[in-house]
């Protein structure tokens, strides 16, 4: 449980690093250690509006978190006894035959499915409910006509299914013994009180971070790169190329061509992605230049000793020691923090505290309106409203044009029918997960 909380927190800090666009920094090299005046123009940030909002955590929020912790602490064992019920996760072995012959992808020695969740062809999962673990069941079924594999679509099939085991989840009781074994507290009341304080602080930190992130976005949106320093831009371009390599690895993992990956998952083509890479690199450099110029202008720094003290606070807040962290992650906390740009994130956080000191407080509504206006969202909302009004006018104008309307309605019905056919084929087919688990053997259930 303690490890889970630590992982979540570390992920949040890393997320901040990614949001700011700041990459890995080392202690030996001082980033942008020269006058940035001729490289970047920064808008005035000395009287920006900000909002304050108090986080509220209810008893229900606390109980929900407790249940989450109990689920994380639950134990799972494979039982070879019992009856299959809705919601159970079971392990099965199955062999499918068409015309008395085994067919490719129709068998698996070990396949996990969750009753009521895993999609198989009609009658497969339903035929296992109420059966005993260890029992072998014969299922006389038929593949749907719209099944994705034309070789078996519409054909009768007989599955011999053996229920190997079912998973039994034992959830611990929330009592003093659980609290004492998993925390520094002695009673459930003490644990609840501390948990509420912790959740409140996390929620407040999240609210404050959102305000700072919004103001940082406003500053960046108003900043202008006069020119880009060659060395830093080259480094950022290399980072963009590494990102492209990671995307291409994902495409290969998904069994997709690179052009197909770009079109389906990123909504662009190779030329468009090349522009995205260039913009990504330039935005990274612009973000860094704004950060370091503002920090130097304001005299904001994070010394090595302050950095280490901040890291120690994070360790303590998540019940880690330096030794236990290294044992869990295989690296020291300081190496992990430096590799993931924590010091840069701490610098940005301290800088935005300074920006808020200069600012003036407004209501939440006024703050959101200001941010939307500065980031151009207001224009987007107005454009959407205009489009909606135009749509209503077109709809009103089309009244009486029965023939055209009927044609469009028929086309819509045709499209809807096609969609339903595709959805039916997907739902009636077996789980894609099955083919992965059985490594090509479980296609009969797919």
Image (spheres, rainbow, N blue to C red):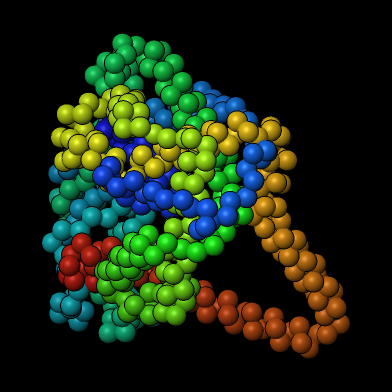
Q: Percent x, y for residue 133?
A: 18, 48
- Residue 385 lies left or right of residue 177; in this view the side is right
Q: Residue at x 37, y 54 (%)?
A: 117
Q: In which quarter of the image is residue 112?
A: bottom left
Q: Is residue 205 visible?
A: yes
Q: In this view, does 212 lie above or below 315?
A: below
Query: How many discs mark residues in the rendered view?
Result: 0
Q: Is residue 160 visible?
A: no
Q: Percent x, y for residue 299?
A: 48, 35
Pick the residue in front: 294 or 160: 294
Question: Which quarter of the rendered picture does the C terminus lie within?
Answer: bottom left
Q: Is residue 86 above or below residue 276?
A: above
Q: In which quarter of the image is residue 302?
A: top left
- Residue 15 lies left or right of residue 29; in this view the side is right
Question: Which quarter of the rendered picture does the N terminus lie within?
Answer: top left
Q: Percent x, y for residue 350?
A: 48, 34
Q: Is residue 159 above or below residue 349?
A: below
Q: Percent x, y for residue 324?
A: 18, 29
- Residue 372 lies left or right of residue 34; in this view the side is right
- Residue 318 lies left or right of residue 99; in this view the side is right
Pick the residue in front: 16 or 159: 16
């Amino acid at each position: 449980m303690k490890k889970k909380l630590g992982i979540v927190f570390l992920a949040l800090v890393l997320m901040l690093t990614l949001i700011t666009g700041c990459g890995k920094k080392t202690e030996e090299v001082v980033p942008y250690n020269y006058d940035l005046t001729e490289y970047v123009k920064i808008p005035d940030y000395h009287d920006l509006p900000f909002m304050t909002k108090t986080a509220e955590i209810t008893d229900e929020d606390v109980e929900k978190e407790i249940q989450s912790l109990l689920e994380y602490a639950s134990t799972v064992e494979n039982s070879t006894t019992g009856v299959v019920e809705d919601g159970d996760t079971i392990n099965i072995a199955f062999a499918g035959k068409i015309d008395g012959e085994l067919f490719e992808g129709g068998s698996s020695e070990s396949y996990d499915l969750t009753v009521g969740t895993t999609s198989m062809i009609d009658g497969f999962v339903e035929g296992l409910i109420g059966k005993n673990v260890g029992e072998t069941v014969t299922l006389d079924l038929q593949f749907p006509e719209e099944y994705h594999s034309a070789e078996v679509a519409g054909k009768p099939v007989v599955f011999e299914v053996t229920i190997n085991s079912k998973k039994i989840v034992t959830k611990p009781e929330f009592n003093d013994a659980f609290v004492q074994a998993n925390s520094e507290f002695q009673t459930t009341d003490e644990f609840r009180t501390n948990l509420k304080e912790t959740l409140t602080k996390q929620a407040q930190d999240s609210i404050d971070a959102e305000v700072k992130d919004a103001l940082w976005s406003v500053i960046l949106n108003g900043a202008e790169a006069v020119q880009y320093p060659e060395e830093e831009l080259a480094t950022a371009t290399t980072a963009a190329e590494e990102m492209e390599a990671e995307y291409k690895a994902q495409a290969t993992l998904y069994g997709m061509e690179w052009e197909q990956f770009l079109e389906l998952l990123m909504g662009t083509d190779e030329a468009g992605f090349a522009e995205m890479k260039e913009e990504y690199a330039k935005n990274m450099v612009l973000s860094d230049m704004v950060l370091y110029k503002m920090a130097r202008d304001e005299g904001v720094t994070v010394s090595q000793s302050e950095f280490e003290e901040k890291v120690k606070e994070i360790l303590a807040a998540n019940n880690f020691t330096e030794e236990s962290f290294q044992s869990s992650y295989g690296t020291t906390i300081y190496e992990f923090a430096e590799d993931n740009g924590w010091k840069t994130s701490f610098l940005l956080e301290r800088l935005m505290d300074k920006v808020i000191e200069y600012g003036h407080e407004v209501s939440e509504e006024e703050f959101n309106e200001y941010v939307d206006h500065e980031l151009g969202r207001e224009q987007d909302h107005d454009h959407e409203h205009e489009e909606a009004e135009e749509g209503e006018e077109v709809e009103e104008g089309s009244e009486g044009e029965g023939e055209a309307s009927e044609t469009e309605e028929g086309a819509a019905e045709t499209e809807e029918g096609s969609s339903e056919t595709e959805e039916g084929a997907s739902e009636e087919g077996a789980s894609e997960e099955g083919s992965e688990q059985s490594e090509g053997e479980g296609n009969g259930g797919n």
